[in-house]
Every structure is written in structure tokens, then in C-alpha cells.
Amino acid sequence: MTTASNPNILQSAPNSSAARTQFVESDGRRLAYRVVGAGKPLLLCNRFRGVLDLWDPAFIDALAAQGFQVITFDYSGLGQSTGEATYNPLALAKDGKDLIEALGLKNPAIGGWSIGGIAAQILLAMTGDMASHLVLLATTPPGPLVKSGEQLFYDTAALPGISLDQFTTVFFEPADAASRQASKRSFERITARTEDRSPDVPAEWAIAQIGSEPRNPLFPSPEILQLLKATNIPVLHLGGDHDIVMPVENWYALNGELPTLHLVTYPRAGHGPHHQHPQMAAAQIAAFIQGTHRS
């Protein structure tokens, strides 16, 4: 696997608990990031209201165990990063691009969860041949949707703070006992870290950025849809069968139109399938990246 080219600012930890926040100055702001593992770089763009500490450590550590150097970061103005805070996907993608360039990542895979998946698709367009693979986690494709999200997400995501009930409703399948148990385990792993935590994103500010009800399309970008229809870069989407904000059905509606798209759907799972099944998700991402190449 290809490794990152700038070891001086890519001080990697063996696991999430040992990872410390690092900073890089780029384009007038300071981006906060962490690096776990060694191997092929995998840059992950975070979800709505996501910061460094809201990735499940079990998922990040499982990716590192599969031979990835996992880079996570706080968007500009959020968490421990400085700059102007926004959920404009173009700005989120620019954060990812600037971090790739500042850290000197060579041939990285790029990925993203939820709104970070939208950013990752735009980042693919920005980076072109720089990226080897696109890994999407519970996100939406560009263009009109065959199934819109549910009002439940917007009502729940707008609640201040972070509680187990809120976490379960948004990211898991509350109707399933096994999913609820997985949510509790994931929530406990995420909240276990007490030092060097990134501040939470204020709920009131965040919901004002995206609106308080479902939209269709959620990602109105015909040029990115055309890119996905023409790219030779392998694309993977991992989703849950009951995602209340970005239904996986919208990816299946594009069967036959996206030539490099691989789809994996977890049963009785929601908007955080990689947190419900961290080891399996990491293994499937590794198999995808190791087993696919540009045509």
C-alpha cells in the first residue's frame, strides 16, 4: 500500500485512544486533524454536527488494523479548527483538499459520511487523479431522489447536546433490539475519551445551515452526477436499510448508470452502519480498495 509522503506532520498513533490532535495552517486558517495507523492514506470527511471525537474509535481502529493510515479532521470553524464555519459542501470539500495538499498525501482514498459524503464527492472532482478510491458512508447521490428523508431526522438532529436516545434514533434502527444494543456500545466508546476533545457543534447553528425539513434534491449538483457517470475511479457506498435522512434506495435507483459503483447495504441499520458494524465495515472497505483499481 502507498504511504503518505510527509512524515514530519503525519505523526501517526497506533490507535484512537493514543491519537492526539495536530494542526496545520492552510489558506489563513488552522485545520485540526488526527492520524491513526500506517499504510495507505484514507481521508474521512465527517457528518452533520460531526467533529474529531464523534467517529466511533472501533471503526477507526478497525480501519487501521486493515492497513490504512486514517486521517480525520474538523471542518473550518468547527471543533478545534479555525476559520469560517459553514456547511456549504464546497467549503467542506476545500477543507479536505487543503489538508491533502498540506499533509502531502499521495494516492489517497477519500471518503465521507452523510454531509461529508457529499463533500467527498465534490472533493473527488477537485482532486481528479490524486485520489485512488471514493468511499461513501450513508450519504446521498447528486440529483433528484426517488425517496426523500424523514422529518424525524430534522426534528431529532436539531435537539441540543448529544444523548443516547438521540444517537440511536438518528444513526441506528430503534425498532431492532440488536441495533439498539450496538448503539449503546458505540455511544459508550465515543464518549469514553475525556481529554483533547473537540467541542460539539451547536445544534441551533447547525440546523439553520441545512434547513428544518427534507429537501429533494438534497444535493442538486448535475455536474457531480455526470462525473460519477463517467469516472473510472472505484466508488463504494455503505448504507443501512432504514436511513432516515439519506435513504439507500436513491443509490439503487442509479443501478446501471454509475459504472464503478459498489453497493453494500446492512439490514436493520440506520444512518451510521459503520458504527453498528465497525469491524465488518472496515473489512469491506479494505477488500474494496485492495480488490479494485481504475479501469
Image (cartoon, grey):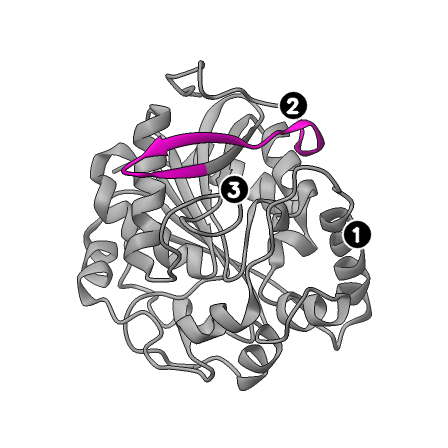
Quadrant containing the N terminus in the rendered view = top left
3 relative to 102, above or below = above
Return the x and y of residue 2 as percentages of the image width and height: 40, 20
Magenta segment boundaries in residue numbering? 14-31
Mark 3 vs mark 2, CA separation in Å: 19 Å
Tell me the tag on residue 14: 2
Going from the N terminus, do you reach mark 1 or mark 2 first? 2
Find disc 1 in the rendering and name its residue.
188
Q: Position of residue 83 (x, y in %)?
A: 37, 48
Depicted 63 relative to depicted 236: above or below:
above
Which one is closest to the eye, mark 3 or mark 1? 1
Q: Secondary structure at mark 2?
A: loop
Quickly name the residue at label 3. Answer: 285
Q: Secondary structure at mark 3?
A: helix
Residue 294 in view, yes or no: yes
Q: Residue at point 57% right, 76% down?
A: 158
Closer to the chain start, of discs 3 and 2, is: 2
Q: Is residue 216 left or right of residue 59?
A: left
* Residue type for callout 1: Glu
